[in-house]
Image (cartoon, rainbow, N blue to C red):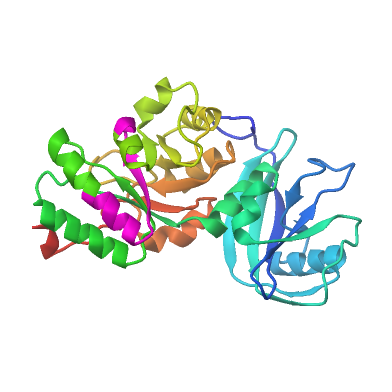
Amino acid sequence: MSKPAEIPDNTPPIHVMAGVVTDVRGRVLLARRTQGRDLAGLWEFPGGKVDPGETPEEALARELQEELGIDADIGEPLIRVPQQMPHKRIVLDVRHVPTHRGHPRGLDGQALAWVPRDKLPRYAMPPADRPVVAALLQAERYLVTPSPYDMSDDAWLAALDAALATGIRRVQLRAPDVGQGRWRTLAAEAVARCRIRRAEILINGDEALAMTYGVGLHLRAEQLKKRRKRDFPDDLRLAASCHDAHDLKRAEMVGCDFVVLGAVNETASHPGQPGMGWARFAALRECTSLPIYAIGGLGMDAMADARQQGAQGIAAIRALWPQGPSQS
């Protein structure tokens, strides 16, 4: 695990480009780091450092030519991951490489592997590459449901259906201020509807309920602080809400699969309380290899900024929950 720190040191980060090179079967190319290099033996997305005077796109094209012997078409950004290493800081700037000419070869003696996307998590990778795999495979929107306390069950479920219809594929079922009996019944129906849409489900705070339905668990920040180990099935997601470097360190220690970090901006639920801002978010991003969702006063128009700061995507209530008559 990378060393946690409240604020990374002032050493300028090394700008490193990496490409998600794919073939006609949709497989992703990985390269194995050679002996004598940092993190030797680990698999990574191919690429290298940006030289002075180069644009990021030029640097990636050059590196792929030098390392693999291919003429690559550099596509859209995927994610930009700031990461603090034991002896340096890097920013891993990842781009899609949808097409290329030539057959990739390990020109530096590195082993190569064409990997089906769903098999990527099986490969041991440097810390900065873990969020890249998550960005490729996991949902970029994490819906946190509002409490149904002032809504009918039918209206709340209709709004959930509407959210799922927009393509939401990761949902945190959360219901503060609702009686346990009502919530268990409502949660059972919500789980069923999410499964029909093949959306991943996590229950906020209630481990027994999560185990009952065989779904993931999202730990509140106060629950995370008391947890000493994962103690939750490996085939179910474990996530947590984090606010600082200490939370991130504990989330990594207990084996969380991803976290939510914020608030980035001031929120309607906490007016007058400023958010941490993107600079602080990026500094904390450096402290962990966990996939992170940004939360707090963010809409879908912040997705590009979130990815540029190393976030998996956006977690939100208002921005992802349908607004309108269905809530009345």
Q: Residue at x 31, y 56 (%)?
A: 194
284 or 197: which is nearer to us? 197
Question: Is 224 above or below relative to 91?
Answer: above
Among the 4 quarters of the image, the one containing residue 213? top left
Question: Quick check: can you spot residue 192?
Answer: yes
**How many numbered discs sit on the rendered protein?**
0
106 or 261: which is nearer to us? 106
Left or right: residue 242 compared with residue 173: right
Among the 4 quarters of the image, the one containing residue 175? top left
Look at the image and tell me in which quarter the C terminus lies: bottom left
Left or right: residue 19 compared with residue 134: right
Q: Residue at x 24, y 64 (%)?
A: 162
Question: Is 305 above or below relative to 61?
Answer: above
190 or 141: which is nearer to us? 190
- Give x and y (percent) for residue 92: 66, 52
Question: Quick check: can you spot residue 146?
Answer: no
Which portion, as a residue range, is magenta? 189-208
- Give x and y (percent) for residue 52: 78, 59
Q: Residue furthest bottom?
A: 101
Residue 241 magenta: no
Among the 4 quarters of the image, the one containing residue 113? bottom right
- Give x and y (percent) for residue 292: 49, 45
Question: Is 126 above or below relative to 143?
Answer: above
- Give x and y (percent) for residue 249: 53, 29
Q: Residue at x 64, y 32 (%)?
A: 1
